[in-house]
Amino acid sequence: MRYSVLTLFPDAVLPYTHTSIVGKACDKGLITVEAINPRDFTANKHRKVDDTPYGGGPGMVMAAQPLVDAYESLLALAEPSITLLTSPGGRPLTDGWARKLASLQHIVILCGHYEGMDARVHDCIPNVHEVSIGDFVLTGGELAALCVIDAVSRFIPGVVQKTESVDGDSHSATDIYPKGLLEHPHYTRPETFRGYPVPEVLLSGNHAAIAAWRHQQALDKTRRIRPDLLP
Ligand code: SAH
């Protein structure tokens, strides 16, 4: 998978992609992440990337030209599989969408800043979809881009050691629970920590009883915290 992130702040994106599981996926050549700065594509001599909004109002708007030209610089070889425009008004990023995106070859992610982007960026780029990482507003799209890269990469074979570890995670859809459940709690050594023992059943070696306990825990937690996920 190739990710191309269009951002005014490459330094906010690239260090994370050299870290931990995503970093290892880069080292193994399973993914590549590049940052392209729209400021390098400005057509004005002051390299200005934003301007005041038509119609008035507070804040600055990212101009369309540097973003669209930066996007078009990627077209020399082939059209990207999809372009994601980060926005609090976008389609929510879910586990299911991340799984589907993981089968693509090349994802372009556009990061806004300030008040957002000129709406004509959307008009000029084919196969573009707005993506939101939640019902809150960030100051820029860089963290959203990283969320997409991280959540999608987990589903690329070889990125996470064991595939069953992603399939059993919170939000993984099953036939009975199409929106997934929240995962059961985990415990590791020691057996007692600050007076809190590990639940007996996990020490029993009885795999069926452990599976049943974990499922019940997942169900209870989902009912308590995210009843909206239950069918
Ligand atoms: N004025 C806009 C918010 C702009 S926030 C509005 O009210 O909708 C600046 C940039 O941060 C956005 O262009 C987008 O790239 C990013 N951003 C903010 N919140 C986000 C979210 N929840 N999901 C994805 N991107 C977000």
Image (cartoon, helix red, strand yellow):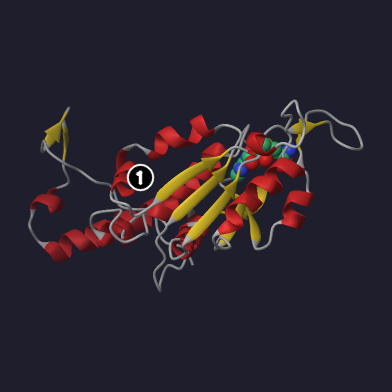
The kind of residue on which mark 1 rests is Val
In front of the other: 190 or 103? 103
Q: Is residue 6 left or right of residue 150?
A: right
In front of the other: 11 or 151? 11
Q: Position of residue 177 (x, y in %)?
A: 42, 67
Q: Position of residue 26 (x, y in %)?
A: 34, 47
In front of the other: 14 or 47? 47
Q: Residue at x 58, y 57 (%)?
A: 76
Ligand 1 quadrant in view:
top right
Q: Position of residue 60 (x, y in %)?
A: 77, 30
Report helix, strand or loop for mark 1. helix
Residue under pointer 1: 22
Q: Position of residue 87 (x, y in %)?
A: 65, 46
Q: Residue at x 45, y 36 (%)?
A: 14
- For residue 19, above or below residue 29: above
Which image quadrant: the N terminus? bottom left
